[in-house]
Amino acid sequence: MTTSNHTNRLSQETSPYLKQHAHNPVDWYPWGPEALERARREDKPIFLSIGYSTCHWCHVMAHESFENEGIAALMNQHFVNIKVDREERPDLDETYMTAVQLMTGRGGWPMSVFLSPDLKPFYAGTYFPPEDRGGMPGFPRILQALSEAYHQKRDTVVKMGQEVESRLKLLAEMVGQGREFTIASLSQAAAKLKENFDLVHGGFGGAPKFPRALELAFLLIQSRLAGDQEAVKMVGLSLEKIGRGGIYDQVGGGFHRYTVDGEWLVPHFEKMLYDNALLVPLYLAHFQLSGDPLSRLIARDTLDFVLRELRAPQGGFYSAWDADSEGEEGKFYVWSLEEFEKVAGSDAPLAMAALGVTAAGNFEGNNILTAALSEKELAARFNLSPEEAGRSLQRARERLFAVREGRVKPHRDEKIITAWNSLMLSALALGTQVLGDTKYYEAAARGARFLLTEMWRDDQLLRIWAEGQASISGFLDDYAGLANACLDLYDTDFHPAWLEAAIRLGERLEDLFLDAADGTYFYVARDQESILVRSKSMHDQSVPAGNSLAARVFWRLWRITEKDPYQTRFQAILRRFQIQATENPWGFSHYLTVAALNLLPSLDLTLVGDPGDSRMQGLLAEVYRRFLPERRLVFKNPADAARIEGLAPAARDYPADDTGAVAYLCHHFTCQPPTGNPKELAAKLEEIRPITS
């Protein structure tokens, strides 16, 4: 293999992923008019390669094929080669990933799609080896065969492209059945999830094993709606096993992407912003429900990891940490027995037992750390008090962390993505509410201000910030995600500006994305480029779908503003997907969460008084201490009452109290006497039970 000092067009891009390929001998183009026009002018097929900067197998294919002079020459001779960062252009990724799945029955990254100049796919796959291997054809053979097919069997190629395009359009135009969710249909969906639950290790299914935060979140909400204690236990078991496994970074905090086994032991070591953003609220909710100190610790340490390693100077948050460092997957995280003993010092015997370290190791002769024993179990084994065992383990962790900080860190993808940032802003806001640490709110507020200024141009939202530049028009999940984050910030500091921002984002979402035919939303705005079909973000995957996020935004805005159009909007989305979600909850878990929230009896809390009043802080603490996902929380400061009364009309009905802060509580259309006593409010909140009949 040889590599070249050649610099291609990708050197001018801001995407870290595209820049990784800037010195390939492949004559890469970014997606755009120049490449597409050349394909049409020269009647050449397009090779479209889609991936992202922390994708391990993207790196492998790049090294084996795109850095190979001979393979690059074949690509340059026969194709117009386009490289796309899936995180910058999720619209292209969604369209062509659906095509790959239709054509091959599977998908993933790197995504390799061959297109005619009119952008219709005629052959597709994921990773291809540089030579015939393991029953897979080598990439050079594929390149030559597809070039010949394009020029010599054009009718077949055209027919294939037309068939795929037709199937894409059929999927995009599926009509909903228009049914309402019921408690029974949600219980049916929950039962289907439970069928695949791992009763030993928690989570769902076997290897490879993903945390599936959205499915677990639905089970938590469903437990509140239907009194389903089995669901609570399933979530608790899952969070404990995940938090004690190798998928969780036991030294530095934060979660890896997934594990290659079914026991949460050996991770694929990349860390994605969105995984951590979605898991933190689960651990916070479990702590609210159970008081489990492990859930509290994991939520806190994960947020601290994000602030330490993923926070950008501008205030946003970077996208990911790679799996590899120094060319080896997981090298940053694993320990040999000898190094571990040296670093842990006198605490080594206890730390080895606590973190599962052995001479044989559990990963290629080294050790991925796990939380093998609890502090109570350690105390019994080493004849210590739990406090002494905890202090010993903490000393060892601190030494391990200090030494690890001296290692070469994995590559960090320093793109700021609006939708992913929005999920993290929500997690940070919830972190302050539940953990009581204002540093998380301060980070969330600063990040939101960054997005609402630097990423908001000409009354439209942008998606990407990289190398000091904002680019790419925002998609549905960018608008809906940021609106949700603003509502979570309002629930934390109660400044009306956050509520106003959420309302404005909701209005623009309606203007730019609505499909008036069925009340759902397109993924791409009406003034943006659409390829083959104007698709909709329908399925919840690793992150919530744009439509399910929009449903949650409109449900929350309806609860606060009491404006009927918001109710119409979220109900239209839920009706559109009710049958699919009930029958296949795996692709619709966030829709199910919104449906469950809507079916829970209304819980309205209005707090009136001075935000600096110590009694007010006591009232708020009682609200934040409890898992009340259905709550509508409005704060009225008598010194600035008109502003919030204009946004949340119900606030007009609640007067200030001469004695100070006061809480008004209404549940299921029945209001309780106001109280300024935190203990009284706590007792009232404890009495609340969902009404399921």
Image: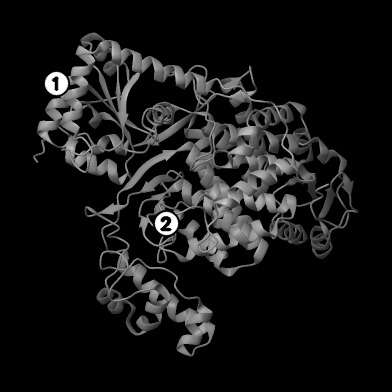
Q: Which mark is residue 308?
A: 2
Horizontal and vertical percent position of residue 154 = 26, 11
Horizontal and vertical percent position of residue 236 = 59, 62
Q: Secondary structure at mark 2?
A: helix
Please identify, in this view, whether the residue under mark 2 or under mark 1 is nearer the observer.
Answer: 1
Side of 638 relative to 5 (left or right): right
- Residue 118 seen in render: no
- Name the residue carrying label 1: 77
Horizontal and vertical percent position of residue 179 = 71, 30
Do labels 2 and 1 touch, CB within 8 Å? no
Give the distance between the C-alpha atoms of the residues marked 2 and 1, in whole angstroms.
Answer: 46 Å
Side of 654 relative to 614 (left or right): right
Q: Which residue corresponds to the image point at 29% horizontal and 60% vertical from the top-left?
A: 332
Q: Secondary structure at mark 1?
A: helix
Relative to 76, say whether 219 is above or below.
below
Relative to 157, say whether 639 is above or below.
below
Location of the N terminus (image quadrant):
top left
